[in-house]
Image (cartoon, helix red, strand yellow):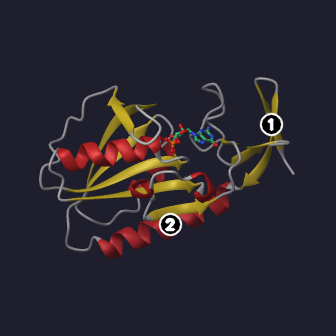
Amino acid sequence: MQSVEVNGRVFDEYVTSQEIAQSVAKVAERINADYAGKAPLMICVLNGAFMYASDLFKQIELSAEITFVRLKSYEGTKTTGDVKLLTPLYVDVKGRDVIVIEDIVDTGLTMHGFVKYLKEQGANSVEITSFLFKPDALQYADAEPKYVGMSIPTKFVLGYGLDYDELGRNLPSLYVLRGN
Ligand code: 5GP
């Protein structure tokens, strides 16, 4: 098994780039079928989702658009989350069928806030595709992604766009923190 060291932590290879490609292709197939005849607006959440978004978008056979946003989530109270847009959303989402492209849904706080924001802005529909989903960590039901590349246990992962202290995003496979 291949491992990498990032900032003094050891990560073991968990999902190969070939397996990643297969799961991305399956998600693209489902989106192509579900959105046939529609023109969805895909919103990639930076930074982590850039690699997934790139691989996925190449396989979308719809008249789809893509735009990018950076989000920062914070806990308002114990039960309500909120999200701040660090970059503006340059495309009007009013009446649009939006598909949010995320790298990983963990507690769901970020997606909970962003979905709420998109609906307030008048999106016709909002669905989430997340390359990774940690179902056991989910705290916000409305943040559950409809199109999931892979469901994983609640462990810290790295690579394929996901970072550890901003490093490791360039790894083409997915790695998991050893002893996590
Ligand atoms: P949530 O708001 O769902 O709790 O967290 C989502 C964000 O937390 C992701 O977009 C990602 O930035 C970060 N995150 C959650 N789990 C992991 C993980 O296992 N590895 C990495 N690198 N980031 C994670």
Between 173 and 145, the one lying in front of the other is: 145
Task: Tell me: is circle 2 under 8 Å from ligand 1.
Answer: no
**Residue drawn at x 59%, y 61% as measured from the top left:** 150
For residue 70, above or below residue 63: above
Which comes sooner in the sequence, label 2 or label 1? 1
Mark pair 2, 1: CA separation? 26 Å
Ligand 1's image quarter is top right
For mark 1, what is the residue?
4
Which kind of residue does numbered mark 1 sit on?
Val
Kindly indicate the quadrant of the structure image that contains residue 88. top left
Give residue 157's position: percent from left, percent from top: 68, 44
For residue 28, above or below residue 17: below
Between 59 and 156, the one lying in front of the other is: 156
Give residue 147's position: percent from left, percent from top: 45, 64
Is disc 1 surrounded by few (<14), some (14 to 19) or many (20+) residues within 10 Å? some
SS label for mark 2 = helix
Q: Specify the label residue 25 is tagged with.
A: 2
Which kind of residue does numbered mark 2 sit on?
Ala
- Farthest front residue? 78
**Residue drawn at x 20%, y 67% as measured from the top left:** 38
Question: How many numbered markers are drawn?
Answer: 2
Give residue 82's position: percent from left, percent from top: 36, 35
Give residue 141's position: percent from left, percent from top: 44, 58
> What quarter of the picture does the C terminus occupy?
top right
SS label for mark 1 = strand
In the drawing, does residue 113 fall left or right of residue 79? Answer: left
For residue 32, above or below residue 40: below
